[in-house]
Amino acid sequence: MSDVIFNWVPDRGSPLPLYRQLADYISGKIACGDWAVGDRLPAQRVLAQRLGLNRSTVVQAMEELASFGVLEADYGGGTRVGSNTWSLRMAGGGMDWGRYLHAGPFPANTPTIQTIFRLEFQPGYYRLGSGEPSPQLFPREAIGEALSRAAARAPALGYLPPAGLPELREAVAHRLERRGIRLPPSCVLITSGAIQALQLISASMLKSGSTVFAESPTYLKSLQIFPSAGARLQGLAMDREGLRPGALRAALTPCAARSGLLYTIPTFQNPTGTTMPQSRREELFQLCLERRLPVIEDDAYGELWLDAPPPAPIKALDRTGGILYLGTVSKTLSPGLRLGWLVGPESVVQRLADVKSQTDCGTSSLSQWAFLELLESGAYDAHLAALRAALRARRDAAAALLTRRFASLADYFLPSGGFYIWLRPRPEAATERLFQRALERGLLLHPGTLYGFGRTSALRLSYAYESPERFSRGLGLLADLLEGN
């Protein structure tokens, strides 16, 4: 069951009444299988506002369809698709995809996530929580030159080896030596972003019923990927120094240690921005080593330090192959390149490369050649230096505004790197209501409930996407909202 998407515009020049146009649109979407039985429609008030119609017009269309059993009231309010029999008959028949859409193991996104993903691509909203770098920070000239050199250098853009372009695997392995990770290129797997690495691990290395331990809150996507493989997620308490090893120790039963693993983001954590100090990294690593608990270390933000370089990755402590280390260019260059890497034992790399070859036949050849050019030319390091300076200025501007407007409205944590500010309104606000009220003001927020294992009033703010001017205006609107103005 999911929320439907309206891509309909009323034709005010048509002789057909507007309520009839709306009813025909809805029945047509159901008839062709775009909307399935159980899918939810927006509230009538919201729908009328979105379509520019009188609410009575929407009510008339809904009541007519409800009289045929096509729509019915949803428990707790709203309307959902109740049947497709009438609409299918009116349309001359069609396939009932509703029986198939939710039969697979991968869960649907929550309505809030679906709304965010839809509205991010519509103009007019202040994207205060988006987890990607601003288009203003994209190194167009460097990318253009790298693509040009890659086109001249690549023999063709055909399939590459399943584990990735050999020259790029070597370059990544060489680069990781700076972070204290010393492994041969055979231990590097090039992936279509770090998220694909999580998918490969879930699909081929997790038993159904396994326990995946993770910080609470944690990265949005990991909350869906692991359960799709039949794994059970267990959140672990954090503080301002990241995951607390004592929380993991208390949760580790013998069974969980044998079949589970730990997923952690120790550096500039998403969504809280916290960074684990070296002493805690050593304690956590020693605990996992003693309990033989595999670790996935997600280091998507590790090179985006703003004040001083962070401690070395936990993987730098690993001499027994117990940690799978993930990296990506989605946060440093662009998520559209779909390029990342996994570092681990050769046996794991070979297994995941085999699974990868069966699912996508390889990561983009063009992206791999272009990134290799950026690394070898030094353009990537030059870009990182400029990106850090830009993000530092954005964070500091956000900090000044938070001090000025939010001192009495919220508690917040300012990171020393990465993208995110973790903000908790004071007093606590109902997240769902705040999200909807913010939408009415053109604010697209990321509620903390998207990242955790329970209810929270926190918000994830990102100073990385919007321009400093738009981010400042958006924060001002958020302050007005929290003040009740």
Image (spheres, rainbow, N blue to C red):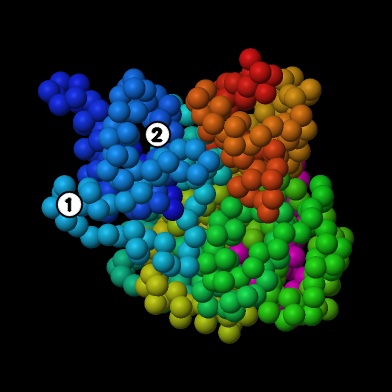
Mark 1 lies on residue: 89
From where the camera sits, is residue 122 visible? yes
Rendered view: 354 above or below 117: below
Residue 287 colored magenta? no
Q: How dense is the environment of label 2, judged by Cα within 10 Å: few (below 14), some, or many (20 and up)?
A: few
Q: Amino acid at mark 2?
A: Gln
Percent position of residue 282, x then y: 84, 66
Percent position of residue 259, x then y: 68, 79
Left or right, 96 with respect to 399, comes to left
Residue at the spot 43% in from the left edge and 26% down from the top edge: 45
> Splitting the image into 4 quarters, where does residue 26 fall?
top left
User: Label for residue 122?
Assistant: 2
Q: How dense is the environment of label 1, judged by Cα within 10 Å: few (below 14), some, or many (20 and up)?
A: few
- Cα distance, mark 2 to mark 1? 35 Å
> Splitting the image into 4 quarters, where does residue 281 fall?
bottom right
What is the secondary structure assignment of the residue under circle 1? helix
Q: Do the residues bearing badges 2 and 1 touch, measured as CB atoms within 8 Å?
A: no
**Start-end of magenta stretch:** 306-326
Tell me which secondary structure the magenta stretch mostly adopts. loop
Q: Amino acid at mark 1?
A: Arg
Left or right, 404 with respect to 78, comes to right
Hey, which residue is sitting farthest top in the picture?
A: 485
Residue 307 colored magenta? yes
Rendered view: 379 above or below 118: below
What is the secondary structure assignment of the residue under circle 2? loop
